[in-house]
Image: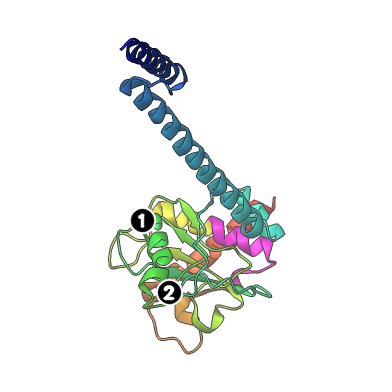
Amino acid sequence: MKNDHISTNNNRKNNNKKGTADEEFSTPHLPPWIAAFFGFIALCVIVGAFVIEIRGNNTEDKDEHRYVYAARTVIQAELDGLDWVEQMFLDINPFSRPEIFLDEINGIVIHNIGNPNTTALQNRNYFNNLQHRQHRFASSHFIVCLDGAIIQCIPVDEIAYASNIRNYDTLSIEVTHPDDTGRFTDESYTALVRLTAWLCLQYNLTSADVIRHHDVQGIITDCPRYFVNNPEAWDRFLQDVEREMERQSQ
């Protein structure tokens, strides 16, 4: 009985020691709210790093885009420096910007936008979205807005799908207009004269090298409508371009 009593006491002591060891070396448990807090902080760090990486990549893409496409030629670099022309280049795609390079510029073709009372930005976006619709080919180097703002859609050393057989040696300018007559606003007309004269000087062209889409061989179209229906207005436009060239040359 005595030995049994001693044995029982020893077992109790051993059990107590084992319990003490478990308590000393077991992993402490954090309160749930602290664990949740640190988990939230870790998630924020991961998401923040991801966003920074994406923004950095986008910035690099934009810088690369401007370096490769905006300053590829001397004249395009000059355009970049004009505060009255805004570059909003179309995405490279087969339907509106195929990135086919022009070897020479022998003329400038004037067009009117097919949709009256729309803005230059709306028509620029229409051209850009053709890559998704894939039902027609259309674009222009420049679009003049109702208020006289000018958007450049395609660099001047690439073709635009605007002037049929003359796509490969001309630059195209589309002009917005408020109604079906096709007559330009005073602001858009003034901007068109300024841009046309500037391009003529850059490429050593004269007003004789400025034509209507209607004048392209093999084409049946009344574009630009007001100038086709009113030949005297077209003659006056060419005269205004000549005077503007003289002004810009001074």
- Coordinates of residue 99 in the picture (x, y in percent): 58, 71
Q: Secondary structure at mark 1?
A: loop
Residue drawn 52% across the image and 65% down it: 141
Mark 1 vs 2, N-terminal side: 1
Residue 221 position by quadrant: bottom left
Q: Nearer the viewer, mark 1 or mark 2?
A: 1
Q: Which residue is mark 2?
A: 231
Residue drawn 48% across the image and 54% down it: 150
Callout 1 touching callout 2 (CB < 8 Å)? no
Location of residue 17 with respect to 51 vertically, above or below: above
Q: Which residues are magenta?
A: 194-207
Q: Which residue is mark 1?
A: 119
Q: Is residue 236 left or right of residue 248?
A: left
Examine the structure image and report whether residue 138 is included in the region drawn in magenta. Answer: no
Relative depth, front residue between 151 and 245: 151
Q: Which SS type dominates the magenta stretch?
A: helix
Location of residue 123 with respect to 61 vertically, above or below: below
